[in-house]
Image: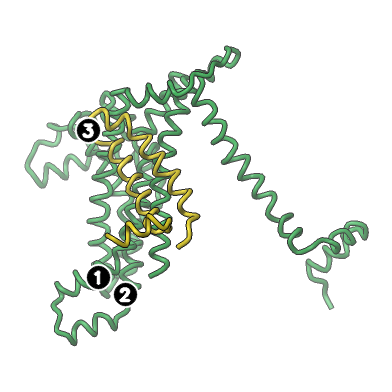
Amino acid sequence: MSDTPFDRAAKATPPTVASKIRGLSDRAIAWIFVLPTIFLLLAVNIFPLIWTINLSFTNFRANRPNREVEYIGFRNYERILTDSDIWLTMQATAHFLFWTIFFQVLIGFTLAWLINRKFRGNDLWTTLIVLPMMLSPAVVGNFWTFLYQPQIGLFNYGISFLTGVDPSSFQMIGDVTLAPWSIVIVDTWMWTPFVMLICLAGLRSIPDYIYEAAEIDRASQWRQFWTITIPMVLPFLMLAVLFRGIENFKMFDLVVQLTGGGPGSITELTSINLKREAFEKWRTGYASAYAIILFVTVFGLASIYVKALNKVKER
Amino acid sequence: MTGFFQGLMRFRRGPWEMLASILIALGVVMLMQPLVMWAYTYSFIVTLTGTVMFIVVSHFPD
């Protein structure tokens, strides 16, 4: 009879160690398995968070580590929450958040609704639509800068073809009014498939007998859509909105690669602004307070998300 | 509506979580709105109150 890996491990364990392990309770063994993870969680997540909270009450600068650190109370928070420039970055983030979520939900749900209808090549279309989501944000940002080029960019030529406007007459990335929309378009292009997949899961979870019962009651397609499809997909849609909301609140790589926060600071989202404060101006204490404000906001939104998730589970 | 207030008075989880969620959402709106500076200034305290409240009330009985 061949030995299993467990048998070999048991034989290789010295008798003194084996006797000690045999004497341990199930609970103690469970703790031995869980402890490394708890330690890692404390070291990687909890300790940096506590340290950041501590730094947020100081005037510490990471580029001057030998300078005496002073505790300045809530002054960093006061400065951030009365700074009109940061308020503008919050508004830029709000614009980005609102419109990306709006378009992603609208297009994502429509695509899911179309894909859910059984037709030839259904799986191929699903794979093709999902492709942008699989790319790296840095790669997407890089190739969209080429697509947005006024002289050679395909996007400008596409718009020119549809509207008749001269392709070199407008700059998506360089124009103050168009730049915020350029990042909305790219994020929508990249993440609509994600919303589509969530909506598709919702649509496929609706049992056919509900529609059959509605047909027997002579409910029109329009009525079936508003009284069966929408209410049953709503929790999934809500989840998609919260997922994308939290993710886009932290958006950094795609926008840095695409516009770098410009022109001026018109597309400077909070995460880009925070990086500048922390690693260009080296105002570590100030940036820590800024990070805590963003963290509390995202954590609050995540709490609502968990509540919504529990409601979906209950259904 | 009466049930909501009764739930609040009896320290039930559902209505209190709802209240905390409203505070968080209000704080986020205040943080990002482009209209009044004072709303932006007080947004963090509203969000923080909502978030701490959410953590506390999630331990209330159903």
- In the image, is residue B33 above or below residue B22? above
Q: Is residue A53 left or right of residue A250?
A: right
User: Mark 2 = which residue?
Assistant: A206
First of labels 1, 2 by sequence position = 2
Q: Colour of chain A?
A: green
Q: Is residue A223 left or right of residue B17?
A: left
Please state which amino acid type lies under the numbered disc 2.
Ile
Image coordinates of residue B46 in percent, x first then y, are 36, 38
Under tag 2, what secondary structure?
loop
Under tag 3, what secondary structure?
loop
Please state which amino acid type lies under the numbered disc 1.
Thr
Chain (yellow): B
| Quarter of the picture holding the N terminus of chain A | bottom right
User: Mark 1 = which residue?
Assistant: A229
The chain to which mark 2 is attached is A
User: Mark 3 = which residue?
Assistant: B34
